């Protein structure tokens, strides 16, 4: 099933762009609900969000709350960072492994990691080489003593920084983890606790090795539910294993009508977009309609699934975004850890509307807004955007354990928008 759309100046059809912004990508991602429907809160909501996304990236940077907690908080009201440990406890709902990066995944999807584990056992890890003797010694200790952390093994580091500085036991533990012989049963002080997979995985968990057909179906299922609107290149982002069946699987879904192929005039061959029927058919609600809701702003993590694939983000939303924590300071365009700001208006339409470089000064309980830049807000939306942004920043401060905001640099592409935002932030009790 194909739908042809005339191209506008951006290369994307206007109808397609509207569907993608208001219904497909945003709604499917789960960061916001275009229809304003209630979502489960706290632990229940976090579990539901993880099942929906299939992968939540883990990151060590803690200038604000870490990415995995931030991603779940964006989708589950009243989620608290400590609740992730509950998802890993019995009855286990989440487990740590690797998707496009280190990530929490739903325990029911563990079997779809087995092809990568098999590859690591066969070919070794891409980034490091483990010493066979050390691997055997480490495995024997975990088998005999139960869950262990890196710090439970003595040994010097090899260098200064990065994985190449890991001591031999750390390299062995990570090899065994990536090979699926050990699993993480949780973290203490952000260090994994490793145990034998055969001892730690839940009884009855499906551990059947998926074939190419099953993996293709899984990859496309994840794209449909979590991306909503996607290209072939967006499916299985960052995944290398058993991708061979993707082309035929997508063609099959288009043929049976479960996927719609969007034939955008002027788009290059091989760059067709696909959408699941439900997101494509659901748009923003007219202002004042029963589905109209209060405007809302969202401060997202740089590793949020909605923005993690920068090529897709730019192609779909025209949003050129880069996180610059890995860029030398003199070369940064914006700041160390720029957080994207997403705005949903009262009709359900959404747009990326700025960037925030912030730091949680936890001892002082202050969230410092080192640089805040806002843009792209139509004049009729200035006031609602400013109010929504101030409310979101107050929520974000509380999530980071802070009682108040401290505003540094504020920039806007519209003087009246800057004045509206500044006035809201200066009059908000949290500022």
Image (tube, helix red, strand yellow):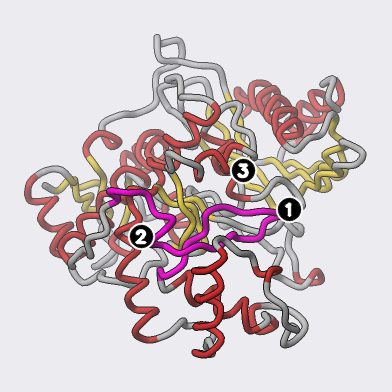
Upstream in the sequence, badge 3 or badge 2?
Answer: 3
Image: magenta residue range:
180-205
In the drawing, does residue 169 fall left or right of residue 112? right
Q: Residue at x 75, y 84 (%)?
A: 156
- Dot 3 or dot 1, earlier in sequence: 1
Residue 342, visible in the rendered structure: yes
Pointer 3 local density, CA inside 10 Å: few below 14, some 14–19, many at least 20: many
Helix, strand or loop under label 3: helix
CA distance separating discs 1 and 2:
28 Å
Marks 3,1: beta carbons within 8 A: no
Which residue lies most toward the right here? 364
Identify the secondary structure beneath mark 2: helix
Gap between marks 3 and 2, in whole Å?
23 Å
Residue 70 or residue 156, whichever sits in front: 156
Secondary structure under the numbered disc 1 in the rendered image = loop
In the rendered image, the vertical position of residue 98 relative to residue 299, given as above or below: below
Q: Reply yes or no: does residue 169 show up in magenta.
A: no
> Circle 1 sits on which residue?
62
Q: Name the residue under label 3.
A: 70
Q: In this view, does 230 lie above or below 282?
A: below
Which mark sits nearer the N-terminus, 1 or 2? 1
The answer to whether the residues at label 1 and label 2 have Cβ atoms under 8 Å apart is: no
Residue shown at 42%/70% (left/top)?
Answer: 181
Q: Name the residue under label 2.
A: 234
Residue at 82% across, 21% down: 428
Number of numbered discs present?
3
Location of the C terminus by quadrant is top right
């Amino acid at each position: 099933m194909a739908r042809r759309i005339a191209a506008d100046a951006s290369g994307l059809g206007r109808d397609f762009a509207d569907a993608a912004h208001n219904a497909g990508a945003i709604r499917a991602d789960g960061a916001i609900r275009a229809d304003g429907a209630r979502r489960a809160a706290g632990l229940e909501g976090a579990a539901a969000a993880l099942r929906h996304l299939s992968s939540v990236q883990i990151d060590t940077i803690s200038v604000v709350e870490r990415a995995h907690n931030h991603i779940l908080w964006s989708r589950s009201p009243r989620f608290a960072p400590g609740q992730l440990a509950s998802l890993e406890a019995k009855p286990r709902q989440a487990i740590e492994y690797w998707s496009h990066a280190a990530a929490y995944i739903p325990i029911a999807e563990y079997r779809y990691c087995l092809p990568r584990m098999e590859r690591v056992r066969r070919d070794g890890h891409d980034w490091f080489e483990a010493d066979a003797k050390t691997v055997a010694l480490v495995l024997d200790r975990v088998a005999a003593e139960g869950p262990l952390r890196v710090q439970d093994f003595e040994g010097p580091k090899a260098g200064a920084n990065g994985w190449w500085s890991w001591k031999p036991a750390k390299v062995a533990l990570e090899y065994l983890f990536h090979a699926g012989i050990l699993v993480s049963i949780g973290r203490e002080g952000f260090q994994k606790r490793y145990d034998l997979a055969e001892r730690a995985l839940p009884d009855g968990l499906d551990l059947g090795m998926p074939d190419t057909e099953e993996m293709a179906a899984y990859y496309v299922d994840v794209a449909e539910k979590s991306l909503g609107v996607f290209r072939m290149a967006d499916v299985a982002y960052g995944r290398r294993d058993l991708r061979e069946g993707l082309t035929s699987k997508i063609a099959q879904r288009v043929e049976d009508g479960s996927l719609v192929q969007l034939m955008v005039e002027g788009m290059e061959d091989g760059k067709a977009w696909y959408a699941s029927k439900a997101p494509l058919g659901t748009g923003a609600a007219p202002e004042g309609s029963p589905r109209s809701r209060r405007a809302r702003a969202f401060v997202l993590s740089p590793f949020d699934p909605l923005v993690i694939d920068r090529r897709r983000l730019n192609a779909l939303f025209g949003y050129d975004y880069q996180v610059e924590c890995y860029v030398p300071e003199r070369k940064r365009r914006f700041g160390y850890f720029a957080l994207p700001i997403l705005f949903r208006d009262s009709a359900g339409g959404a747009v990326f509307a700025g960037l925030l470089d912030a730091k949680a000064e936890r001892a002082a309980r202050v969230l410092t807004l080192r640089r805040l830049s806002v843009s792209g807000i139509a004049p009729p939306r200035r006031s609602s955007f400013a109010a929504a942004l101030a409310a979101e920043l107050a929520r974000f401060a509380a999530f980071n354990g802070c009682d108040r905001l401290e505003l540094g640099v504020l920039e806007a592409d519209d003087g009246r928008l800057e004045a509206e935002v500044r006035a809201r932030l200066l009059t908000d009790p949290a500022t």
